[in-house]
Image (tube, grey):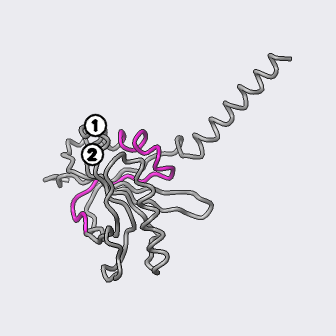
Amino acid sequence: MIKHTIFAVLLGLVIFGVYITTYVGAFRGVKISEGEAPPFLLLGKEHVGPYHKIVADIQEVEAWAKAHGVDCSQSFGLYLNDPRNTEEERLRSWGGCWISTPQITGLPEDFKIQTWGSAYFVKAVFDGSPGIGPMKVYPRVEDYMNEKQMKRLPGTLEVYVIHPGNEMTTTYYFPVEKPLHP
């Protein structure tokens, strides 16, 4: 009887583990391309500290945008430091909404509108949770850039879009020096 119970519990844990990894997109591919991108107009708030704690700042900007009729169908996290070379509590990032117009008034004091980009990018698209991006997307993009001998520039922009049914697409923009010969 105990063997059957242990087996049932272990089987349940395996099924749950497979479900969770499927749900977050662990088995989904990453589409990588490169090219020019127009500047991104961003409404956001600065965050200093661990990158995974930026979610509250993004949600605060999204809530303000919704309450003031500002389209925030695409939110973002702009990560300015390499976490391999920067202490976690000193990591700088910026989170909020990708907007289409700079004519927004009455911003809270800690919100800003800025333009970022207008460079050559390696772009990665992943239909899964951004929580596994550092383990799934970043290594693949680094391999791509190394293979093409690209020099990465500071910053990474992650743009988040939630689809009906809570499916999510994250598009990653990694600025690189434009190659002399594509």
Q: Where residue 178 sits: x, y (%)?
A: 17, 55
Q: Furthest-front residue in view?
A: 109
**Kind of element beneath mark 2:** helix
Quadrant assignment, res 4: top right
The residue lying toward the viewer, choosing from 80 and 108, is 108
Callout 1 crowding tier (Cα within 10 Å): few <14, some 14–19, many ≥20:
few
Residue at 37%, 57% (x, y): give it.
77
Which tag is nearer the camera, tag 2 or tag 1? 2
Q: CA distance from mark 2 to mark 1?
A: 12 Å
Q: Mark 2–mark 1 contact, CB under 8 Å?
A: no
Residue at 33%, 69% (x, y): give it.
111
Q: Where residue 96 sits: x, y (%)?
A: 39, 64
Residue at 82%, 17% (x, y): give it.
2
Q: Earlier in the sequence, mark 2 or mark 1?
A: 1
Relative to 70, does residue 84 appear above or below in the rendering?
Answer: above
The residue indicated by pointer 1 is: 84
Quadrant assignment, res 6: top right
Query: Is residue 42 in view from this perspective?
Result: no
Quadrant assignment, res 65: bottom left
Q: Quadrant of the N terminus?
A: top right
Q: Where residue 66 sits: x, y (%)?
A: 49, 75
Q: Amino acid at mark 2?
A: Arg
Q: Where residue 63 sits: x, y (%)?
A: 48, 69
Residue at 32%, 83% (x, y): give it.
103
Give left or right: position of 42 versus 22. left
The residue indicated by pointer 2 is: 90
The range drawn in magenta is 115-140
Relative to 133, does residue 35 appear above or below in the rendering?
Answer: below
Relative to 96, does residue 70 appear above or below in the rendering?
Answer: below
The residue lying toward the viewer, choosing from 174 and 90, is 90
